[in-house]
């Protein structure tokens, strides 16, 4: 549009010069020694032809350049290079004869971009769904494997108990007796896991193991308390302290010695022994300073039952 306007103005100027030259040739043909009206007309036609040819060539080259852009953009659209095609088409000026065609291609590229984005979105959603399904399948498989392993573990523990566990191997030291308590704690953890399962077979197995563990603990804790009192008696003998267990199930541990003539010593020893006495589930620890003393100073330690699950949680 700009080039057409400029051409029109230039041709208008030439026409004005023609009119002026026809009136007075010397005003236009200042370089000519003998200016005439005929020469003015000749120069007018010559310049008009030259200007027309030059502008025609220039405008044709612009048209060729625009067509090149159109063809290049169309190829890029085929290759799905939509953004690059749009940038090239936007270079075509609104005054260009191919501007409308360029706008049509831009609209097509925009539509294809939207289609591509929608396809990408759907593809991502499909991929996410697939990942979620795979994760769910994996979780289900892991849960099934875990249940299978738990079932086998409970069955192994039941079979081991049925064959007979030699608890005598846990005697002789406080450390080995504590290992027996760790075994009770392990069984308790397995039972709790089995009880929380949705599998009825596992629940039944956990119930069977639980009844066996309760029976074992009711039998073993009195033995453990008696064994502990023997070990404590050997250790405290050199301090002139006598240690005995009394009561049903050996639940009371009694300390007798001159050391306990003062309440402070009783409290200090109780503070030192409280954790281990609770571990072996002594109901009371009792202190007196000589054999004939009628009353004890006693402390309550464990208030539960021997059948309660053993845990080492803080």
Image (cartoon, rainbow, N blue to C red):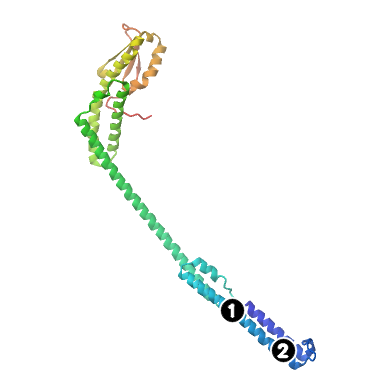
> Rounded to the nearest whole Å, what is the CA distance between mark 1 and mark 2?
27 Å
Q: Secondary structure under badge 1?
A: helix
Tell me if residue 37 can be seen: yes
Total marks placed: 2
Which residue position is annotated with label 1? Answer: 61
Q: Which mark is residue 43?
A: 2
Q: Residue furthest top?
A: 292
Q: Nearer the viewer, residue 26 or 284?
A: 26
In the image, residue 160 lies at what x, y percent? Answer: 22, 32
Q: Residues within 10 Å of mark 2 (few under 14, many from 20)?
A: some
**Which element carries disc 2, helix, strand or loop?**
helix
Of 137 and 171, the residue lying toward us: 171
Q: Residues within 10 Å of mark 1 (few under 14, many from 20)?
A: few
Q: Quadrant of residue 40?
A: bottom right
| Residue 71 shown left or right of residue 128 in the figure | right
Determine the residue positioned at 65% across, 79% down.
5
Q: Position of residue 163 (x, y in %)?
A: 19, 31
- Residue 109 point in image, percent of width and height: 48, 69
Image quarter (top left, top right, bottom left or bottom right) of the C terminus: top left
* Front residue (pair 80, 223): 80
The residue sitting at 49% across, 73% down in the picture is 74
The residue drawn where x is 39% and y is 18% is 272
Give the residue at x 69% y 86%: 47
**Position of 205 relative to 299 (above/below):** below
Residue 30: quarter of image: bottom right
> Is 106 left or right of 173, judged from the image as shown?
right
Asked if one can make out residue 309 in the rendered structure from this viewpoint, the answer is no
């Amino acid at each position: 549009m700009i080039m057409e306007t400029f051409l029109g103005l230039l041709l208008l100027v030439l026409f004005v010069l023609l009119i002026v030259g026809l009136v007075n040739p010397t005003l236009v043909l200042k370089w000519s020694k003998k200016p005439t009206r005929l020469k003015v007309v000749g120069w007018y036609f010559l310049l008009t032809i030259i200007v027309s040819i030059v502008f025609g060539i220039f405008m044709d080259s612009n048209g060729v350049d625009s067509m090149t852009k159109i063809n290049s953009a169309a190829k890029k659209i085929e290759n799905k290079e939509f953004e690059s095609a749009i940038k090239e088409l936007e270079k075509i000026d609104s005054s260009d004869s191919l501007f409308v065609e360029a706008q049509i291609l831009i609209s097509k590229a925009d539509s294809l971009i939207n289609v591509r984005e929608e396809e990408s979105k759907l593809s991502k959603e499909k991929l996410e769904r697939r990942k979620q399904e795979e994760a769910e399948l994996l979780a289900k498989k892991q849960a099934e494997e875990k249940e299978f392993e738990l079932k086998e573990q409970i069955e192994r523990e039941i079979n081991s108990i049925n064959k007979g566990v030699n608890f005598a191997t846990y005697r002789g030291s406080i450390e080995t007796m504590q290992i027996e308590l760790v075994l009770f704690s392990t069984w308790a953890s397995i039972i709790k896991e089995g009880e929380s399962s949705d599998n009825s077979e596992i629940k039944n197995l956990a119930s069977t193991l639980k009844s066996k563990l309760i029976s074992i603990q009711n039998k073993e804790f009195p033995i453990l308390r008696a064994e502990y009192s023997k070990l404590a008696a050997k250790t405290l003998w050199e301090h002139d302290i006598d240690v005995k267990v009394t009561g049903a199930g050996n639940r009371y541990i009694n300390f007798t010695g001159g050391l306990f003539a003062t309440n402070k010593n009783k409290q200090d020893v109780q503070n030192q022994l409280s954790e281990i006495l609770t571990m072996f589930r002594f109901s009371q620890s009792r202190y007196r300073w000589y054999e004939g003393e009628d009353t004890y100073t006693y402390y309550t330690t464990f208030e539960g039952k021997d059948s309660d699950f053993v845990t080492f949680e803080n």
